[in-house]
Image: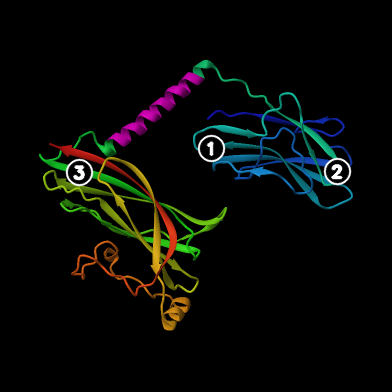
């Protein structure tokens, strides 16, 4: 990492260097410290009126701030002014905010409406070409070493499938839940693989609890929850059925009571590629006074014990299922993505 020297000049009717004494009425001191601070925006002229400052946050790394401390003879208070921030991020990039002075000086105004002008200049000597080349060679060796570590962890062998076998690697992401009535929501999911397919992975899971926030005319809870499964099947026994993912949205309140907020499912064709779906959900509405009171105060009613009942009810004998008497209402929308990679051995 290259080191730079930064010279700060403060002008109050006359130019003052960092090591110079201040005028008799106002004493100026500069402080250097090495902790994370909010950074100024990249505007050319920085005006401070009392404490109203426009600030921008950058990535976390090693940082240093150069400040001016204004001491007044007629007051015991100290006014600190941020002059410059230097930050080195995780990639070794040095950021100076505001930038080195090129044409105009920077200006700030203190609480007494006194105007100060200062400049920031890079006075470091440029490194020699041999030093720069040695640094590039070192960075190249570090990159090759990191690459070798990844290759050793992943391996170079490619596992071949048995004859007449196909394999699917599926990555899922539960992106968000939108327009649900309760603020704290988590998603329970269940995967049903097509006939003729098998998987050794866990096909059920729960996301973290996320609180929604207002977005325009909607309320959205962002998850970014990812999970993966591997599915294998015989080429001759593979059916044309799609993979199904069942979702159950559940809310939890301050007292730890759980309430069902919606059911829904999505069909994913077993075709290589990427898909994104918005799943509209529904929930069972309490139809008696007892159930309404229980749902409002302690939750838990009503809900489905078996999520697969949404797709394939096991207790029905007729070809058609009658849901007469079950009152349902529409609920929120769950957005999820999927990507499928297929490997086949003819």
- Closer to the chain start, of discs 3 and 1, is 1
Q: Is residue 207 above or below residue 64?
A: below
Q: Local crowd at mark 2 within 10 Å, few (<14), some, or many (≥20)?
A: few
Task: Check residue 138 for magenta coloring.
Answer: yes
Please tell me which residue is depicted at 59% across the width and 20% down the height of the picture. 126
Q: Is residue 221 left or right of residue 249?
A: right
Alpha-carbon span between mark 2 and mark 1:
36 Å
How far from the left and from the top, in percent, is residue 151? 29, 34
Please tell me which residue is depicted at 21% across the width and 48% down the height of the picture. 231
Q: Quadrant of the C terminus?
A: top left
Instruction: Determine which of the numbered discs, if any, sits on residue 167 in the image.
Output: 3
Instruction: Determine which of the numbered discs, if any, sits on residue 53 in the image.
Output: none
Whether residue 248 can be seen here = no
Q: Which residue is mark 1?
A: 89
Q: Is residue 317 left or right of residue 74?
A: left
The overriding secondary structure of the stretch rendered in magenta is helix
Residue positioned most to the top: 129
Q: Is residue 320 above or below residue 302?
A: above
How far from the left and from the top, in percent, is residue 99? 66, 30
Instruction: Determine which of the numbered discs, if any, sits on residue 113 in the image.
Output: 2
Q: Nearer the viewer, residue 27 or 316?
A: 316
How far from the left and from the top, in percent, is residue 285? 41, 72
- Closer to the chain start, of discs 3 and 2, is 2
- Closer to the chain start, of discs 2 and 1, is 1
Q: Which residues are magenta?
A: 132-151
Dot 1 falls on a residue whose secondary structure is loop
Task: Check residue 27 for magenta coloring.
Answer: no
Q: Is residue 159 left or right of residue 19?
A: left
């Amino acid at each position: 990492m290259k080191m730079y020297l930064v010279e700060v000049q403060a002008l109050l009717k006359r130019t003052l260097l960092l090591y110079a004494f201040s005028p008799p009425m106002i004493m100026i001191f500069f402080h250097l410290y090495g902790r994370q601070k909010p950074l100024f925006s990249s505007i050319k002229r920085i005006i401070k009126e009392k404490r109203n400052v426009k600030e921008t946050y950058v990535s976390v790394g090693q940082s240093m701030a150069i400040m001016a401390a204004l001491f007044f003879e007629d007051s015991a208070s100290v006014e600190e002014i941020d002059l410059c921030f230097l930050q080195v991020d995780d990639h070794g990039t040095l950021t100076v905010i505001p930038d080195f002075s090129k044409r105009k000086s920077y200006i700030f105004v203190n609480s007494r409406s006194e105007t100060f002008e200062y400049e920031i200049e890079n006075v470091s000597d440029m490194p020699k070409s041999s030093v720069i080349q040695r640094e590039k060679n070192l960075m190249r060796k570090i990159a090759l070493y990191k690459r070798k570590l990844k290759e050793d962890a992943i391996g170079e062998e490619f596992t071949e499938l048995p004859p007449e076998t196909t394999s699917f690697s599926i990555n899922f992401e539960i992106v968000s839940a939108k327009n649900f009535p309760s603020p704290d929501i988590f998603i329970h999911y269940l995967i049903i693989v097509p006939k003729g397919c098998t998987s050794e992975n866990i096909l059920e899971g729960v996301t973290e609890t996320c609180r929604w926030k207002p977005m325009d005319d909607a309320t959205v809870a962002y998850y970014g929850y990812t999970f993966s499964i591997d599915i294998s099947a015989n080429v001759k026994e593979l059916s044309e059925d799609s993979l199904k993912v069942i979702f159950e949205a559940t809310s939890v309140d301050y007292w730890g009571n759980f309430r069902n907020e919606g059911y829904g499912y999505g069909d994913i064709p077993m075709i290589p590629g990427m898909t994104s779906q918005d799943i509209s959900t529904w929930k069972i509405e309490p139809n008696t006074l007892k159930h309404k009171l229980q749902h409002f105060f302690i939750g838990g009613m009503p809900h489905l014990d078996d999520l697969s009942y949404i797709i394939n009810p096991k207790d029905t004998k007729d070809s058609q299922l009658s849901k007469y008497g079950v009152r349902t209402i529409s609920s929120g929308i769950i957005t999820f993505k999927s990507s499928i990679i297929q490997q086949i051995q003819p």
